[in-house]
């Protein structure tokens, strides 16, 4: 195992163990609203602190981008991208579908990724060029050849309500041709399930880098394809993601095209606004 991946695993397990210790009383924990339908608990914060402490102890010169505390640490080539508890709403309700996600970006490219499901003790790991694994067993994306008969994962665009109409159109289109759609509420874990073949594909609007980073690498290393909904490589920036095995990915890409004009327009406008603010 790559030494940096080994540290990422240690950090993810430390955060996950803390989450499990509090799971029995999750409904009693204080939860604060960060935005519409978006919550943070004291366990999110404690898990994040534990993960960051592990990473910074090993690599004090690396930067951090974490869901709750934001960007911290030195600027440089190495950036750890952390979601300490993906699926907070599930956790709060005792719904056992949540995970820890830790990824390392080096010079703008994700090189190491870990997704840890502490309730099932499932550890998904990937190093660029070395494949993807689930509990030390090599994993591959599914062999499903067409959308007909496929099982897809998705997530509702709860952070960006302006995309809800376009999303519902895509949902209906896929519902009409697939075997089923699953919305479990933890995007990082959904991406891990694509990597190991439990889901044939996945799409979602309005995610954040910490939702995507580790899972995207897992899928690529498991033989799958990942892009923005627009077919571009900057899905970490855009937050709109589509993924699957090669055949499913191509078919999803064609089906999505008619429904994405409003998403394309808003994404372009946001890019223009970002460039203006940074100039």
Image (cartoon, grey):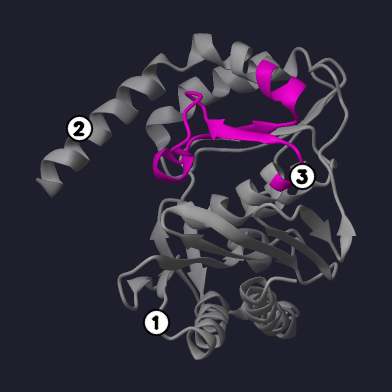
- Pair 1/2: label in front: 1
Quarter of the image that includes the C terminus: top left
Describe residue 178's horizontal placement relative to residue 34 as left or right.
right
* Label 3 SS: loop
* Label 2 SS: helix
C-alpha gap between disc 1 and disc 3: 30 Å
Number of the label disc, if any, that sits on residue 254: none
Q: Is residue 15 above or below residue 84?
A: below
Q: Residue under circle 3?
A: 222
Q: Please rate how many residues cluster around mark 1, counting C-alpha atoms within 10 Å: few if below 14, some from 14 to 19, many from 20.
A: some
Going from N to C along the chain, the mark reached first, 1 or 2, is 1
Q: Please rate how many residues cluster around mark 2, counting C-alpha atoms within 10 Å: few if below 14, some from 14 to 19, many from 20.
A: few
Q: Residue under circle 2?
A: 272
- Pair 2/3: label in front: 3
Magenta stretch, residue numbers: 221-250
Q: Is residue 183 magenta?
A: no
Q: Is residue 242 magenta?
A: yes
Q: Residue under circle 1?
A: 61
Residue lying furthest left: 279
Residue at position x 52%, y 67% from top? 82
């Amino acid at each position: 195992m790559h030494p940096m991946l080994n540290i990422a695993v240690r950090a993810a397990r430390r955060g996950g163990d803390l989450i499990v210790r509090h799971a029995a009383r999750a409904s009693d924990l204080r939860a604060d609203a960060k935005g519409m339908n978006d919550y943070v608990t004291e366990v999110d914060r404690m898990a994040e602190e534990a993960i960051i402490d592990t990473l910074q102890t090993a690599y004090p010169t690396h930067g951090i981008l974490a869901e709750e505390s934001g960007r911290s640490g030195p600027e440089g080539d190495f950036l750890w991208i952390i979601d300490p508890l993906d699926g907070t709403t599930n956790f709060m309700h005792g719904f056992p579908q949540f995970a820890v996600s830790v990824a390392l970006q080096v010079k703008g490219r994700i090189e190491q990724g870990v997704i840890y499901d502490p309730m099932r003790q499932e550890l998904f790991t990937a190093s660029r060029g070395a494949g993807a694994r689930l509990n030390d067993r090599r994993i591959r994306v599914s062999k499903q050849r067409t959308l007909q008969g496929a099982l897809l994962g998705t997530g509702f665009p709860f952070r960006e309500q302006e995309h809800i109409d376009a999303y519902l159109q895509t949902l209906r289109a896929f519902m009409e041709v697939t075997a089923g759609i699953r919305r479990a509420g933890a995007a990082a874990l959904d991406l891990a399930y694509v990597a190991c073949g439990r889901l044939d594909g996945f799409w979602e609007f309005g995610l954040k880098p910490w939702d995507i980073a580790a899972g995207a690498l897992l899928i690529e290393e498991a033989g799958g394809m990942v892009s923005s909904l627009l077919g571009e490589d900057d899905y970490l920036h855009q937050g709109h993601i589509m993924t699957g095995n090669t055949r499913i990915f191509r078919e999803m890409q064609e089906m999505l095209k008619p429904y994405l004009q409003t998403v394309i327009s808003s994404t372009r406008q946001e890019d223009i606004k970002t460039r203006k603010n940074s100039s």
